[in-house]
Image (tube, helix red, strand yellow):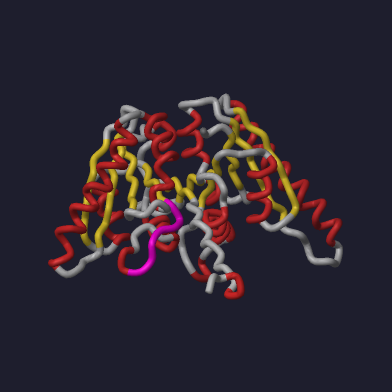
Amino acid sequence: MIERIVVPLDGSLTAEAILPHGRRILQRHDFEVILVRAVVPAPAENSILVADASTLGAREYLHGVQERLDREGVRVQSEVRVGSPIGVILDVVEDRKSTMIAMATHGSTGLKRILLGSVAEAVLRKSPVPALVVRPFWTSEEAQTDDVERRPIRNLLVPVDGSDLSSAVVPSALEFAGLFDARVVLLRVLEPRKKAAEAGEVEEAKSHLQGIGRLFERKGVDTLQIVEKGEPVEEILKTARFHGADLIAMTTHGRSGISRLVTGSVTEQVLHRVPMPLLVVRAEAPARARRRPAALKRK
């Protein structure tokens, strides 16, 4: 259940781009928001004075954001901690028993990636709770003309790849669909194969989606089930545009090799290119059974 949402901020407009999407969720339920600002430790020389000044500035900044949210009726707290952003975010999630993270990422790569860009992706790979992540858009071509806060979530796209890991996003997607009375578009992308193997693979994919669809439909959530062939990232983006997805729900792990679809890299590539937020759930791979030492094996 979504109860406490950690919202990391760094003082930039980029980081604050998550706030309208956060308020979009808060309209439906009385969740609690915890604003977090990490103060990176200063060099040894004059470190105490610099840390004190940075911490004071961070508290004043969060207090201003908190006041704005308070006036809107949001239950909100704020916390400043000294440390690396990734460590601080994950520590606050654990200490406050948070149930979701909501944050922005720059969405670019290489040297152009700002602090929260790399931090967001690292958090996605390590977070024990679902994360709502959005890439800000500053250009006129990408800017969203609607009032994001008031726009309903009508269509939720859920790409899966047939593995138990990719299906780990289903409970979170089901909760969001229930909150907004949204339709769920289930997508399975098959990479091109020889014709002899295609027929059986398509039937298996359809059966798999029907099984997941029943989980949603038992809760009164309508689903549309789609099997496509092609490159996973491109098919996800195409389906999101065609069906007007307001939110995409994905895991950060999946199968590798020829049968790959929802891998961590695919999720990050989608995040870099979509104009809508992602709900990301980290799926843990099952630990491999330890091999018995040779000396203990039966002869």
**Residue closest to the eye, 232 or 196:** 196
Residue 69 picture location, percent across and down: 59, 31
Residue 141 seen in render = no
Q: Is residue 287 left or right of residue 76?
A: left
Q: Is residue 66 left or right of residue 262?
A: right
Q: Is residue 108 left or right of residue 275?
A: right
- Relative to 29, residue 192 above or below: below
Residue 29 picture location, percent across and down: 50, 26
- Relative to 161, residue 111 above or below: below
Please check the rendered image and state whether residue 253 is part of the magenta-colored stretch, yes or no.
Answer: yes
Displayed quadrant of residue 224: top left
Residue drawn at x 47%, y 48% is: 281
Residue drawn at x 69%, y 42% is: 95
Residue 150 seen in render = yes
- The boundaries of the magenta stretch are 251-257
Residue 81 picture location, percent across and down: 73, 48
Residue drawn at x 36%, y 53% is: 274
Displayed quadrant of residue 80: top right
Residue 44 picture location, percent across and down: 84, 66
Please check the rendered image and state whether residue 117 is part of the magenta-colored stretch, yes or no.
Answer: no
